[in-house]
Amino acid sequence: RAAGGALDDPDSVKRHTVDQWLRLDPALPCLAGPIALAALFVKRLRPFAVGLVILIATILRPGYLPAPFILSALPLMAILAAGTGEVALRYLFRTVEQPWVGVRRLRILALAAGALIVSIAVSLWLPTYHGVLDSDDDASMRQAQQWIEQNVPKSDRLIIDDALWLDLIRDGRDRRNVVWGYKVDTDEQVQGWAPHGWPDYDWVVSTASLSAGTRPNGVFTDAVAHSQPAAIFGSGMTRVEVLRVDNGAPTSKTPSPAAPAFGGLLAARLAGVTKPDMLAVLQSRTVDQRVLATLAVIAAMQPVRLEDISAIEGEDDAGIPRREITLSGPRHRLQGAAAFFERQVGPFAAQAVDLTTDGLRVRFPLRTKDIGLATGPAPLQGGPAALRVADLRRSRPAEQLNFVRIDGTAAGSLETSEPAANPSSYRSMPAGTYVVVTNRPGGGDPVIRQVFTLDPGVTYTLALFSAAESGQLAVQLAPDGPPAGPTPDSAVRMLHAAAAAGSVYLAL
């Protein structure tokens, strides 16, 4: 292991470790040296004193100093403190046939010195022990652990503080995916698990002690430098940050909130049944895009009351959009809304749907994919847009495409199984932002497929695919621009709907 530096260096890892010990108990570690030296003169205490002297020498010598090292010295300190105290008292109060004045004075001075030492130790201990007994310094660590268990996939790789390691392993994670931050720069086996360094990790759990005890140019430091906060708990020395590493993976980007302009459109629709403070939240740049899209569809289907758009603990300070809502209303409407949320798939799938006597609480998973509501709409100047549908599915089950404006108003529908031309003829639609929903014929089982924006005067093709991985319907919107070649029929369009991106060879 790399050396921890010298004790007289305030920036060394060893000094930081010793300072941590002294914050927890400022008296006993300082008394260890005098206690050990005094105990060397007591025969029955000498073996314990020698052991404590060896431990003190280990701390003072150059080299690595683990944080739990103090645990091996505490029992010896306690035994020797009690033992030397007992020996001193027995010696001072031993029976003397004719005590002379010097002995009595020595006893008084010894008692006074002992009382002074005890009073100093107690004065140092009381504030520390009061804080230890009354404060919960581990609360932020437990909150971070709970957040990770709920929001970080078990297949993701994490760099963590060692205090979390055992709990996350018990949560069912592979030990190669949960790595103590100190080991990423010092353990050859761990380095072999991540040959590319920090890009091989997805998350970092950063604490004050971990940041102070790692190399300035190591894997941990690089991972922190290339990450963004996803959740923050506590403050000061107990602050714990869960960071998402931007390693180039599709899931490594920080989610963007919905543009306030879209929230304003939906707030106008919900103004009659929603509290003003919730309407204000809708129009702030703090709401997850999926919340707006699903609320627009709910408002068009079966109106319910929006009670709350709550911030998940730890995420507000990290700037993560609010992704949990609470709805209220008649029981039968809430049951229908719960069934709607449970039916959603892909980027619109819910993490938790809980129907209780207080209402319907829905939480979406932590998201990184932009669904099309991050940027506000451009001014709608010009005529309507034109839209046609190309059904490219292997089979063409009867389904209905419904279009819902982002303000929660229905904008029409069409049947995909009509025996018409494929692609269909163009259909005029007002420019604006829409949520595309598929239903069974007759309007049952609505599922959100995509959110898109139609610009004025532009023609589009809405392509329907069969997603090979899930068998679900996939939807993709593409603008129909004019041919770029010398003749009108020289344009070729290829729509790529595969989940795995890669090179494609096209032969005509």
Image (tube, rainbow, N blue to C red):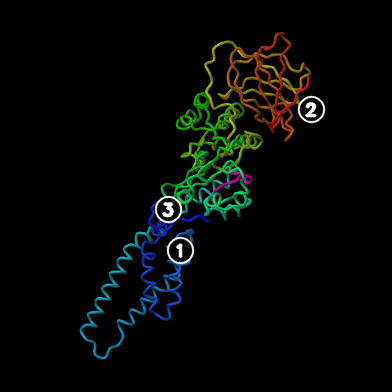
The x, y position of residue 232, in whole percent, is: 48, 43
Residue drawn at (66%, 28%), measured in percent from left and top?
449
Residue drawn at (77%, 16%), measured in percent from left and top?
421
Mark 3, other Cα within 10 Å: few <14 / some 14–19 / many ≥20: some
Residue drawn at (38%, 66%), measured in percent from left and top?
28
Q: Quadrant of the C terminus?
A: top right
The x, y position of residue 158, in whole percent, is: 57, 46
**Residue 362 visible in image:** no
**Numbered disc 1: secondary structure:** helix
Q: Amino acid at mark 3?
A: Ser
Marks 2 and 1 sit apart, C-alpha to C-alpha, by 69 Å
Most foreground residue, 260 or 458: 458
Which segment did they paint magenta?
A: 151-159
Label 3 near label 2: C-beta < 8 Å?
A: no
The mark closer to the camera, 2 or 3, is 3
**Numbered disc 3: secondary structure:** loop
Q: Amino acid at mark 1?
A: Ile
Drawn side of residue 119 relative to residue 387, left or right: left
Q: Tell me if residue 152 comes above or below residue 118 in the rendering.
A: above
| Dominant secondary structure, magenta | loop
The mark closer to the camera, 3 or 1, is 3
Question: What residue does disc 3 label?
Answer: 12
Question: What residue does disc 1 label?
Answer: 70
Residue drawn at (58%, 21%), measured in percent from left and top?
433
Choose top left, top right, bottom left or bottom right for residue 461. Answer: top right
Label 1 near label 3: C-beta < 8 Å?
A: no
The mark closer to the camera, 2 or 1, is 1
Marks 2 and 3 sit apart, C-alpha to C-alpha, by 67 Å
Most foreground residue, 398 or 110: 110
Return the mark for residue 19.
Answer: none
Question: What residue does disc 2 label?
Answer: 395
